[in-house]
Structure formats: structure tokens, C-alpha cells
């Protein structure tokens, strides 16, 4: 289903909220194969070619492997994880950045646990676990963004609040434990999340030995998962989809666009900095609007190492700018650069990421991995790159549940399925 009008999505969200806890219906007569969705945060599409992920390579060889999967813009963690489970681009599902401002709800950031668990930030879309549960399927999520919030009155049946101290092996063991519960409690849709590759990429850069170590560690956890599934007789009967939210690019420490040297930074409300900087007027007064107009006029001129737009003038191909949470003025750094201030750079010396994402989602360094394996998928097939919004309708088809309104295209990806599974 292609892009739908935002008013329709809002009406649908309002309807879902009004029916916050619909009764669970009977599952389909022919129960679908269990589906496990795995995210390896920041696993760039070409990382698999390093030869450090033998388990992932085995699943790719025996299943389906895409040349790449294109993230939605901006190529950031929370926006793209929610896209994967809703099929909506960030501009349509409302999680428009890792850091954002809502006129009613205030400020959202990854470290703000209250905001992260507040369903009002997430209820512009319907995550797949909500639809699955409404159609009789049980669900479980191991650290998926959005799953610890009560969205339209629902959580997954089983979920865990994010805790970065939980090891990759412990995460795998929890998923295996869920899958071994009695049939009346066993989940049909499960997610699993790994973040070591992302952390190493930010801290040391994508070409570092530390990223290579993280690739090995994460693949070892995948091997533990595969071994456990085989021991439990589940491996051949379960569909597994492995994705990433985005890639990673190197950003030398000296590659800074000092925004405060271009504009009087105290005349704007700064919503976000980094790869994608966002600014709003400080208020709605004529003086504040005038000052903001001058800032926009300055920054929308050609700049070195970044491009800036009023949200109404963002390039159409990025599908971004209509949501009220998108700041009025956006500045996107060129790949390999960051946007910051003189004060921030000085105060955080030695603690600045030298690997980043969030850039133009068409850039090769932002492309994500996609591998699929299981009874529904063809074996030994390489498919062309496709956008990550298509993963959602693929999953709803496999689970035999209706898709909520989304931006994906099932017809574009159904060719990776066996004929009897299409």
C-alpha cells in the first residue's frame, strides 16, 4: 500500500485509541509459522563481506540476501526501528528523530525513559505486535524501540525495558525461553535486538578493529540462537528476518560545521544537533519570527559541508517535513561531517563520535543489511536493494494478518518467498 494522507492516519490512530483493548480474536485456522525479526543496529550492508559473520553468511547463503536495504530518512535508530514494524516512514509515524520536540508532550530523547515509554509519542502508527495480538497471535519483544510504551492501550504480550547491560547471549537465551513456553503462551511474532556494532562504530569508527570485534561477538550470539533453535526443533519451521536500521560512516574529529559561527544561536530554539540539526523559532512573536526568518535566509544559502532547508522545502525524495514534530529549519551534514557549536565541541573533547549515521538515506554508507531464512523463503537467492518500508507488509503476509495503512509495497518483495507462501 502506498503513502496515505496524514489525516487518515490520525483518524485511524484515534479510532484505535478509542478501542484501546479490543478482544483477542481466534487465530487463523492454519496457524502461521513463527516469525523472528532480528535487528543488528548499524550493521552496514557491506559488513557481511568482511568475513566476520559466518552465521549470518550461512543464513544468507541458504536463504535470501538483499544487495542492501535502504533506510528511511533520517537514517537514525528510533525512526527506522519504528518504520520496520509499522511500514510507515518517520514523517508519517511520528518518530521523526532520536531527539525531537512536541508542542504538547515536550522533549523526546533516547535517554529520556519517561518519554520513551509514553505511548502518546508512538500512537500515530500501529506496530505489528498490536495487529498480531488483535488477530489471536502472541508476541514478544526483546528491546525493540516502541515496545516498552503502551500504544493504543497495548504492549506486546512479553517485553523488556531496554537495559544495555544485558549481554547478547542473555538476550538470545530469553528469546529461546519464550519460544519454548507451552503452546498457549508461546509467541508467534518475536523481536531481538543487538547494539554492540552500533556502539563500536560510534566510538571507534566503522573501519576499526573494535567494530570487527563487535561483528564477531554478535555473530557468535546468532550462532547460539541457531544452535538453540535446532536443538528445540524450531529452526526449520521458523521464519527469520535479520535487518539493520542504518549503516555507519567515518567522521574525523576535525570535520565540524560550527553552526554558531554562521548564525546567532541564541535567536533560535535548538531541537537537535549532530548529523541532522533542527531549529525552531524561540516563540511565535513577530520579533522571534523575524529573527528566525533571517536565520533561515542565511542558512538556506549554499554552505560548506551541509545543506539547510525550511521543512516545506526538503527534497521530495526524502519524504520528510510534513509532521509537526519536524523542526521548522533543518540542516543536514554532508557524509563524514557533523554539525555542532564551538562550546559543545570544546566541552566534549575526547567524547565525540567518530562514526555517525543520520545522513542522506541514499548514501551507500547508510545502507543496511537484509537477510531472510525459513520455510517461507526461497533458498540461495540474491535480491536487489529495496526500501525498509517493504519489510512490514512482508511480515504481515507471513503472519497472515491484515496490514495497517503503510508506505510499503508487498508486491515489490513477494518474489523472495516460495510460490506456496506468496
Image: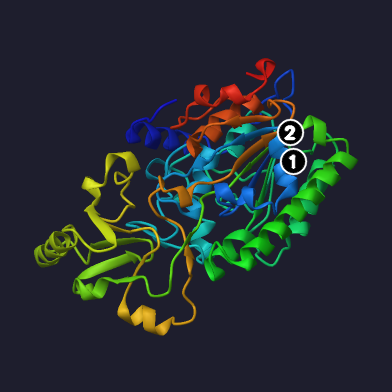
Residue at position x 64%, y 23% from top?
417
Q: Secondary structure at mark 1?
A: helix
Mark 1, residue position: 58
10 Å crowding of disc 2: few (<14), some (14-19), many (20+): some
Q: Is residue 149 left or right of residue 336?
A: right
Residue 296: x, y in percent?
17, 60
Dot label at residue 261: none
Residue 238: x, y in percent?
76, 33
> Where is the N terminus found, in terms of image quarters?
top left
Q: Residue 168: name its quadrant.
A: bottom right
Nearer the observer, 335 or 263: 335
Residue at position x 48%, y 36% from top?
389
Labels 1 & 2 near each other (Cβ < 8 A)? yes
User: Compared to 93, does 338 lie above or below?
Assistant: below
Q: Secondary structure at mark 2?
A: helix
Mark 2, residue position: 62
Nearer the observer, 361 or 161: 361
Q: Is residue 303 left or right of residue 273?
A: left
Residue 7: x, y in percent?
33, 34
> Where is the C terminus found, in terms of image quarters?
top right
User: Compared to 214, does 238 lie above or below?
Assistant: above
Nearer the observer, 283 or 67: 67
Residue 46: x, y in percent?
57, 48
Q: Is residue 348 visible?
A: yes
User: Compared to 410, does 88 lie above or below?
Assistant: below
Q: Residue 197: name its quadrant.
A: bottom right
Amino acid at each position: 500500500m502506498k503513502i496515505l494522507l496524514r489525516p487518515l492516519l490520525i483518524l485511524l490512530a484515534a479510532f484505535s485509541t478509542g478501542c484501546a483493548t479490543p478482544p483477542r480474536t481466534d487465530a487463523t485456522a492454519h496457524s502461521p509459522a513463527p516469525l523472528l525479526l532480528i535487528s543488528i543496529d548499524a550493521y552496514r550492508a557491506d559488513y557481511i563481506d568482511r568475513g566476520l559473520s559466518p552465521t549470518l553468511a550461512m543464513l544468507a547463503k541458504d536463504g535470501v540476501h538483499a544487495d542492501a536495504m535502504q533506510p528511511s530518512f533520517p537514517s537514525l535508530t528510533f525512526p527506522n526501528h519504528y518504520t520496520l514494524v509499522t511500514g510507515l516512514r518517520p514523517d508519517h509515524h511520528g518518530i521523526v528523530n532520536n531527539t525531537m520536540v512536541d508542542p504538547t508532550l515536550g522533549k523526546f530523547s533516547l535517554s529520556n525513559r519517561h518519554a520513551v515509554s509514553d505511548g502518546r509519542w508512538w500512537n500515530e502508527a500501529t506496530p505489528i505486535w498490536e495487529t498480531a495480538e488483535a488477530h489471536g497471535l502472541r508476541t514478544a519483544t526483546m528491546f525493540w524501540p516502541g515496545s516498552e510504551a503502551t500504544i493504543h492501550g497495548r504492549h506486546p504480550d512479553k517485553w523488556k525495558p531496554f537495559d544495555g547491560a544485558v549481554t547478547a547471549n542473555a538476550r538470545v537465551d530469553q528469546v529461546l525461553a519464550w519460544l519454548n513456553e507451552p503452546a498457549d503462551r508461546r509467541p508467534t511474532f518475536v523481536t531481538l535486538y543487538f547494539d554492540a556494532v552500533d556502539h563500536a562504530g560510534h566510538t571507534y569508527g566503522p573501519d576499526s578493529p573494535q567494530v570487527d570485534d563487535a561483528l564477531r561477538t554478535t555473530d557468535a550470539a546468532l550462532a547460539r540462537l541457531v544452535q538453540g533453535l535446532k536443538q528445540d526443533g524450531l529452526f526449520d519451521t521458523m521464519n527469520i528476518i535479520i535487518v539493520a536500521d542504518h549503516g555507519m560512516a567515518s567522521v574525523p574529529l576535525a570535520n565540524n560545521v560550527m553552526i554558531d559561527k554562521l548564525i546567532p544561536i541564541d535567536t533560535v530554539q535548538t531541537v537537535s544537533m549532530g548529523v541532522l540539526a533542527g531549529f525552531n523559532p524561540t516563540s511565535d512573536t513577530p520579533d522571534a519570527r523575524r529573527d528566525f526568518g533571517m536565520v533561515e535566509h542565511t542558512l538556506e544559502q549554499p554552505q560548506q559541508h551541509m545543506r539547510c532547508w525550511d521543512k516545506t522545502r526538503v527534497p521530495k525524495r526524502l519524504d520528510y517535513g510534513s509532521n509537526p514534530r519536524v523542526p521548522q529549519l533543518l540542516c543536514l551534514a554532508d557524509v563524514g561531517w557533523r554539525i555542532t557549536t564551538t562550546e559543545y565541541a570544546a566541552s566534549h573533547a575526547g567524547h565525540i563520535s567518530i562514526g555517525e549515521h543520520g545522513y542522506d538515506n541514499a548514501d551507500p554508507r547508510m545502507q543496511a543489511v537484509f537477510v531472510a531464512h525459513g520455510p517461507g523463503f526461497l533458498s540461495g537467492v540474491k535480491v536487489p536493494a529495496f526500501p525498509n518500508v517493504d519489510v512490514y507488509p512482508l511480515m504481515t503476509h507471513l503472519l497472515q494478518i491484515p496490514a495497517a495503512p503503510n508506505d510499503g509495497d508487498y508486491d515489490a518483495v513477494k518474489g523472495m518467498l516460495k510460490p506456496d507462501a506468496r
